[in-house]
Image (tube, coloured by chain):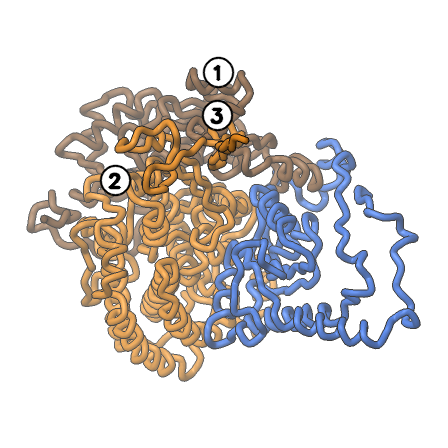
Amino acid sequence: MGLTPATSPSSVTYDPPSQDGWVTTRLEFLVNWARANSLWPMPFGTACCAIEFMATAASRFDLARFGMERMSFSPRQADVLICAGRVPFKLAPVIRRIYQQMPQPKWVISMGACASTGGMFDNYAVVQGIDTIIPVDVYVPGCPPRPEALIYGIMMLQEKVKQQRSIANQQQYDEMTIDPTSKLYIPPSRIDELSEPFGNSVHQTRSAP
Amino acid sequence: MSVVLPGAALPQSTPDPVTPRHVPHHGGEANPSVDGLRVQFGPAIGRHDVMWGETTVWVDVTRIREVMLWLRDDPGQQYDYLVDVTAVEHRDLDLPLEMVWHVRSLPYRRFLRLKATLDKNAALEVASIEPVYKAANWLEREVFDMFGVHFTGHSDLRRILMWETYAEGHPLRKDFPLRGRFSRSEQLSQALAANPEARYSMEELSVADAFHELPADMRARLAASVRTGET
Amino acid sequence: MSTTTRTLDVALSTPTLGSDGTIRHVPLTADARGTLMPIDMAPGSEPDMGSERMLINIGPQHPATHGVLRLVLELDGETVIRCVPHVGYLHCGFEKIGEYRQYNQIIPWTDREDYLNSMGNNIAYALSAERLFGIEITPRCTVLRVIAMELSRIISHLVWLGTTAIDMGAFTPFLWTFQERETVYNLWESWVGARLTTSASRIGGMAADLPPGWIDGLKGFLRSLPKTLDETDRMLTRNGIWVGRTVGIGVMSAAEAINYGLSGPLLRAAGVAYDVRKDVPYLDYETYDWDIAVGTKGDVYDRYLVRMEEMRQSVRIIEQAIARLPDGPINVDDPRVILPPKRKATSEMESMIHHFKLVMEGPRPPVGECYVATESPKGEKGYYLVSDGTSKPVRWRIRPPAFVNLSAISKMAEGHLLSDVIVINASIDIVMGEIDR
């Protein structure tokens, strides 16, 4: 819905192992190993999770041993976008722009409850999960997640990177463009009907928020 | 260089302030500035109330700037510090919107809350006190953004927390639902369409090298210092 | 046969970007010594660089803006003519959502706005709500809250110190200060279970009492912190680079600072001895023996000195508080706000109903409003609560010190260089969560 893949679905194929040479597999292993152990993060830190991210990068938990010593604040030189913190609607085009500026291969870690689902901010101002804007690879729950939790998420991403068929399957780098004309438009009166039971309301004093 | 000391206008014999204990809900000594205000402004000052140790004075909304100027400049008042400007809308929608100003006198160690009501059926307009306290600049912009109150005489009244072309309304009004008026995807579409780089204010664009590339009507508006396109 | 010499006119030119966006070629010529210069320049004349000013956008995603702040600068060369800050990139509707939550349920939101001072915010909000309810807290709670607030002030200033040093290129103090923060994180985790967003206070008391051995851990921290402060002091205070980059930068005079509504270290560095703890005291701060740090010039260097001294004064206050910490209950014995003990709630009917009502509906204050100001590390932080007698506030207003402080950046940055803007921004100690709420 609203997404047009660059090539038709039938052409996204997985190369059967018989066509895989031994050299390609070893090369892929090497490339993936190198990528996983030198992920340069782009810390898109907005709120409290950014402080825990800084604590993870500091000397007690030390992200440098994962190859993430160099925080790249320029998206052009980053591998993984770590969205740490809540993303309001005003910031949504900014994070979309930053993601588009990152060169392939790129991954996204959504750190914290607010980046994953909107967290405790279920209101008019906050994006309910950055996966509505950019594709996310790893979600790290917590409010804020402990540094150990973030490290677990990073290690999970490293596993994902190591399993990628980076040479055999080039289609993974094709980005699908969002169809700008497609949108799920619900008229406001229908929204009130749908969400009244769930509290998108002006009734402030009932017990369900 | 002399240090500015709060409480410097009080006589030496005044004891140092202490943590208030057992503050009554109603009653207690009113702030002496209330009497001064009544003498100076007469009928423009409505009732006053002492609640939880704080004095609230109701003023006529059309005279707020004079009142603030007098409170700041009169040697017996010296309310030199603006703490906050905000508004309150009550759950009973028939009640008017209340504007609230918190001011503090550092030399006299006093705190005063001024309130004025705005009729919701008329235009929500108040004189800006930015000429009196520079602190009011952003505070009034926020009240405008969240409540839709226009501050006349403000140097730069545009939205500050939401983006400038935000179309859903004024969020802190009671008739604005918690999750907004549009569907989530519509909110996303509108947010993503608000190109952040296009959000330069008129004065900023006048500086840019790209002035000649602006459309002609925009250049004409800039030349005439007209504020449009930003609500 | 005649030889002809042909002179090739080699078009020397340099491409430049003209003001209409097209590429122009400026014809060059060479003088006798071979130095290239534009053709329409008479030898000996000054090049007319034009009075073209640049518009530069910093942020909202930028490492040195301490959050999602967008600064638009009008530059003449490297000098800032005008600086326009744009905020709102972290606006999350705190005040709106506060109208839909019970008074105790708002406490986790107070953590998230100024997330560096979460315990301080929790307690500031609890003070305001308790005033609205008309509740007096217990002596043990009073002293414990002082300890918590001062610890919170210390760790907020430690973050400020580390990030400001990083902005100016000194990377190591960041690691030292964050290591100290880890000690406090351990303390908080053992007390309330969370490192950063503590939600430690409740209306009428605290979420939990101290675990055994907590005070010893705190004393250990108070022994190690001054050493770190001394180390950072030795590294920075008389360092030529640090002094050169901070003295005389971003000056605000006392009268300007008061009119702009600045508070906290910015106001004190300008020479105004206003500290909410001394002038509008709460939690018995007037009974402790401590001093306010006041600066003279109002520049970035003075703000740095004020914050360093504030950390040392906080250590002093905490030591006095530990000495006088009384035993006793931590929560006030008021059934309107405090849940009954669990063993009663699970066995007696009335306690169960009481528990149910307090959790489902929430405590209800009398009709009224109040504003209680506290001194957060950023400045005067207050919560203005308006109640209509129901369990959810009509209005929850956060008086954001960093918001008002940041509005003065356009005044502070005028006339300074581009790199000074970063230093000034760091010295304001902004927290976008509080600014945008």
Q: Residue B220 got which mark?
A: 1
**What residue appears at the point 36 percent right and 42 percent down from the top-left corner?**
C34
Q: CA distance from mark 3 to mark 1?
A: 11 Å
Colour chosen for chain A: blue
Numbered disc in front, either 2 or 1: 1
Residue C424 appears in the rendering:
yes
Please say if C198 is above or below A94: below
In the image, residue A47 lies at what x, y percent? 51, 56
Contact, mark 3 vs mark 1 (Cβ under 8 Å): no
The answer for which chain carries disc 2 is B
Numbered disc in front, either 3 or 2: 3
Colour chosen for chain B: brown
Numbered disc in front, either 3 or 1: 3
**What residue appears at the point 15 percent right and 54 percent down from the top-left corner?**
B16
| Quadrant hosting residue B132 | top left
- Helix, strand or loop for disc 2: strand
